[in-house]
Amino acid sequence: MHLNEYQQGALRTAAPKDKHNEVFHLLLGLVGEAGEIAEKAKKIVRDQDSDFTRWDPEDLKKELGDTLWYIAVIADHFDVPLEDIAQLNLTKLADRQQRNKLSGSGDNR
């Protein structure tokens, strides 16, 4: 499946763009889903001595899928195709790698 196909599929279950406060709702949903992933990771650190091999891959796929849904729908609100986001990100990271700047902090490194 291509990312833009996924995005179009995700939109079939999204609220209308003109729904009051919808972008805010979507942003809170994205943060909430990312928080769920972090919470599960925290429990692996706390209860399983950071043994991430114990993370249930099916559960992880579901949670990552939820975050992907929010990203796809938020991007659509701003008329940005997911494939554009993915390509831009890979280009940015390749540039940082070429300049030996993968580590560190700051958006424009």
Image (cartoon, grey):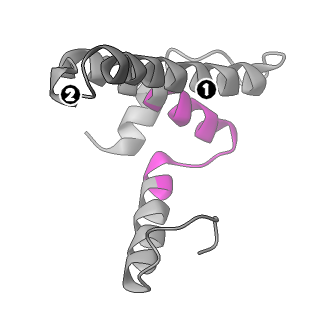
Name the spot of residue 89 as percent of width and height, x first. Answer: 47, 61
Which residue is drawn at the image coordinates 37% and 24% (left, top)?
41
Q: Which element carries disc 2, helix, strand or loop?
A: loop
Which residue is drawn at the image coordinates 37% and 43% (left, top)?
3
Q: Which span of residues is magenta-colored?
A: 68-85
Q: Nearer the viewer, residue 97 or 29?
A: 97
Magenta span: chief secondary structure: helix
Toward the bottom, the furthest residue is 99
Is 79 one of the magenta-colored residues? yes
Query: Going by the image, does 7 lie left or right of 17?
Result: left
Residue 44 location, quadrant: top left
Residue 54 vertical position relative to residue 76 in the rendered view, above or below? above
Q: Nearer the viewer, residue 66 or 55?
A: 55
Of the two numbered discs 1 and 2 on the same chain, state the one appearing first in sequence: 1
Query: Image quadrant for the N terminus?
Result: top left
Residue 14 vertical position relative to residue 5 in the rendered view, above or below? above
Which residue is drawn at the image coordinates 43% and 55% (left, top)?
86
| Residue 72 numbered mark, or none | none
| Residue 31 numbered mark, or none | 1
Which amino acid type is shown beneath numbered disc 2?
Asp
- The residue that mark 2 highlights is 51
Name the spot of residue 69 as percent of width and height, x first. Answer: 47, 26
Q: Nearer the viewer, residue 42 or 4?
A: 42
Query: Image quadrant for the C terminus?
Result: bottom right
Name the spot of residue 83 as percent of width and height, x first. Answer: 43, 52
Q: Which element carries disc 1, helix, strand or loop?
A: helix
